[in-house]
Structure formats: structure tokens, C-alpha cells
Image (cartoon, helix red, strand yellow):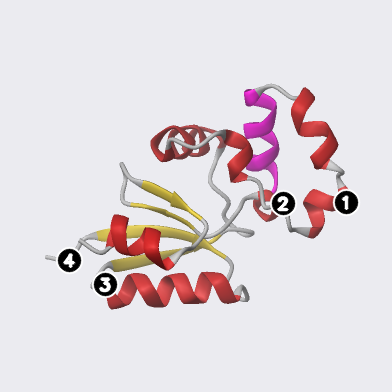
Amino acid sequence: MSKSVVVYQYPQCGTCRNALKSLKQKGLDVQAVHIFDNPPSREELKKLISDSGLDVKKWFNTSGEVYKEMQLKDKLAQMTEDEKIDLLASNGRLIKRPVVTDGSTVTVGYKEELYEEVWGR
């Protein structure tokens, strides 16, 4: 039986397409979720962030237009973790993508070496 993963992604994003292809080549059953239309809820994000072991600021898509328009580079330092999570939950465009989870393990962004290590076994 192949392992299932949920991938929060944006179909027009080249990095997301490469990530999906990589996961499928590893034999994973991939359920793609459009991150702009169906961003993870606040509760889902809390669990995903916790499972990822990453600081919440690593979850922001710092190269995205919304991040820049909102001038978050300057604002995040003053925000609480809850405020950051609320912000991420409010707009899928703010979330660094793709986000991949099997329910306990989570990766954010796409680097083939990381995918090989985490999802390749």
C-alpha cells in the first residue's frame, strides 16, 4: 500500500509542480489541495507548524507579493506567534509552498535532497 500525503500547493507554481512530480515518482499517493482556495485552517496550521519543527516565520512566503505589500518583513518581529498563525490562516498566498504532510511529518518548500530524505523511504 502506498503512503498518502496531502500537498498544499498552487497549480501555477513551477516549484509546486516539481514537488508533486517528485512525490509521485517516489510512489506516494498525492492529494493536492489548492492553497489559495483552501488554505489550512488556524488549527490545522498550528498542528502543521508544530509537526514541522520549524519556527513560524519559516512558514511565510517571503518572496510573495502579498508579503511585500503588507510589509511583513518589518512587522513580523513585533507579532506574537498566534498573530502570525492568524495571518497565515487568513491568506494562503502568505504560506510558503508547497506544504507536504502525511499527518505527522511536515515539509515546507521544496528541495529534492530534503524530499529524498523525508519522503523517499
The amino acid at mark 2 is Thr
Task: Look at the image and tell me in which quarter the N terminus lies.
Answer: bottom left
Nearer to us in this view, 110 or 49: 110
The amino acid at mark 3 is Lys
**Residue position marked by numbered label 3 in the rendering:** 26
Tag of residue 62: 2
The amino acid at mark 1 is Glu
Task: Look at the image and tell me in which quarter the C terminus lies.
Answer: bottom left
**Residue position marked by numbered label 1 in the rendering:** 69
Q: Is residue 106 above or below residue 110?
A: above
Report the Cα–Cα distance between label 2 and label 4: 34 Å
Answer with mark 1 or mark 2, whichever residue precedes in sequence. Answer: 2
Answer with mark 1 or mark 3, whichever residue precedes in sequence. Answer: 3
Answer with mark 2 or mark 3, whichever residue precedes in sequence. Answer: 3
- Helix, strand or loop at label 3? It is loop
Residue at image coords 50%, 76%:
17
Neighbours of disc 1 within 10 Å: few (<14), some (14-19), many (20+): few
- Helix, strand or loop at label 1? It is helix
Closest to the camera, between mark 2 and mark 4, is 2
Q: Position of residue 92 (x, y in %)?
A: 65, 52
> Chief secondary structure of the magenta span?
helix
Closest to the camera, between mark 3 and mark 4, is 3
Neighbours of disc 3 within 10 Å: few (<14), some (14-19), many (20+): some
- Write the start and end of the magenta stretch as one range: 81-91
